[in-house]
Amino acid sequence: MTLSGPPTATLPQPPAGGYYRWLLVLVVAVFVGSLYQRVLHGDEAWIGEQAYWAAKEGRVRSELFRGLLHAEQRQWVYHWLFVWQGAGVIRLVGWSALVLKLISLTYLGAFLLVSYRHLRAHFLPTAPACYLFYALLLGNTLVVEYGYVFRPEVMLMFLGFGSWIFLQRYLHTAQPRSLYVLLAALLAGLAALTHFNGLIFVVAGAGLLLLRRRFGAMLVFSGVALGVFSACFWDVIAHEAWAVYIRQLTPAMKHAQPRLLTYLGYVLDEQKRFFHSPAEVTLSLLVLTSAVVLYKSRYRTPRLADAVLYLLFMIGALACLAQGKTTKYLLLYLPHLCLVITLAFVHQPPRPAWLPKALQVLLALYLVANIGFTGYLFSQHEDQPTQNRQLAQQLTRYRHSRVVAPLEFIFHEMEAFSIQGTTCYKVLMETGQIPDGGLSLFEEAARFQRQVIILDENSRHVLGVPVPVPGQRYGQYRYAYRFQKFYVYELQ
């Protein structure tokens, strides 16, 4: 086993090295181009509204989900650090979709700066290797999408990677310093405080220290990280709100099987995250092939061994902890997957000869699939805040009234209307609190005294509302007109 720094890379130099440089230029250009009039994400409205009320009132609540588990009074379950960070930014520079999106973009930029120095020093000693790593990362459609969406995944990626860097420094310096363990624990704890999925960095860090027999460091790391994480419960404890917290955390669900078997089946379904679409399939095949390449190459260093163990701990922890198998959670350890792939290109074995060719083919398929999905983002661009403002101008007589609308309507009509989101009604249907079907929307909205219901094509379809007929009544509402993509129903 090699104990010194990484050996000289075997990644081809120019013109092949130049190819990776231009590949990076291409994916950066695609990323930047995708930012233009990026379509709003429903979660940006959901989390953004929480940050808005936190900034305005000093408490987290939601008008969008009024009537659901007392969300209009107080929300106890939310992405604690992410929301309060957003509230701080709103108080400093104001409320807008752009401001919120730039938070995630800032964390992506910070990740690029922080990761470069560490990877260049210990894993990727040549410029072409770095070009390839960042092309793999920035070319991934998840990074392109969520790097400009107000969601916590990119922030988690930054904090988790920073925690791993400090663990590497502690484990692989001649004179380990306890400060590195404390900093690693702090960042892992902040990740968990940002989103419960950030607990995977606590599990991975503690697991790695345990396997390396650093028992004292493991206890310190776990204690500090969990201590930081516990901050999200301080309000709940102070207000003795555990009963409401549990209800908001675990909405009623029915299981056809015993709970243990259901949970085990859920954990074993983790492969769905890796084989969801061509973008994830090509990534997974590229990682698996890269693992074979690294095994055949006999490239071994203590740092690489720890990186692989840390990655495996993260994958296992996410399988156990995450709610759902959505692919966006791959972002939490995507840099580690890209590192494995890059190292396989750097340390290709001479035999078998087909392995390098397989890597190149899979790389091409990965880029085609991901750039293709990014192209879909291009095709979906729209200036939704402007559309919302134009619709609001049509509804001037209802200004400051109670309305039902898609979540994204809050940009930037939060202060012009009292908005209850269409998604709230969908959740009420899914949890059995109101019957399924479009008529339930109109009955429940009338009970909430909503003067206007605004639907777009997506919300109409999701809620099961039939195609509207001009002048037709739906419960106590009459379909009034269509404006651009919006259907407008008025209470009679």
Image (cartoon, grey):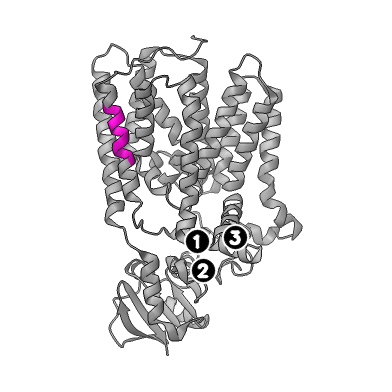
Name the element at disc 1: helix
- Callout 2 environment at 10 Å: few (<14), some (14 to 19), or many (20+)? many
Q: Is residue 282 visible?
A: no
Contact, CB < 8 Å: mark 1 with mark 2? yes
Q: Which residues are magenta?
A: 19-28
Q: Is residue 447 visible?
A: yes
Q: Earlier in the sequence, mark 2 or mark 3?
A: 2
Residue 383 is left or right of residue 80, and the answer is left
- Identify which residue is drawn at 39% across, 71% down: 388
Query: Looking at the rendering, in which quadrant would you find the C terminus?
Result: bottom left
- Majority secondary structure of the magenta segment? helix
- Which residue is disc 3 drawn over? 91
- Identify which residue is drawn at 27% across, 25% down: 18
Point out which mark residue 132 bears: none
Give the Cα distance between marks 2 and 3.
21 Å
Residue toward you, 372 or 386:
386
Residue 265 is left or right of residue 181, and the answer is left
Could you tell me residue 29's position as x and y percent? 31, 42
Quadrant of the rendered image containing residue 78:
bottom right
Quadrant of the rendered image containing residue 281:
top left
- Which residue is disc 2 drawn over? 64
- Which residue is disc 1 drawn over? 46
Contact, CB < 8 Å: mark 3 with mark 1? no
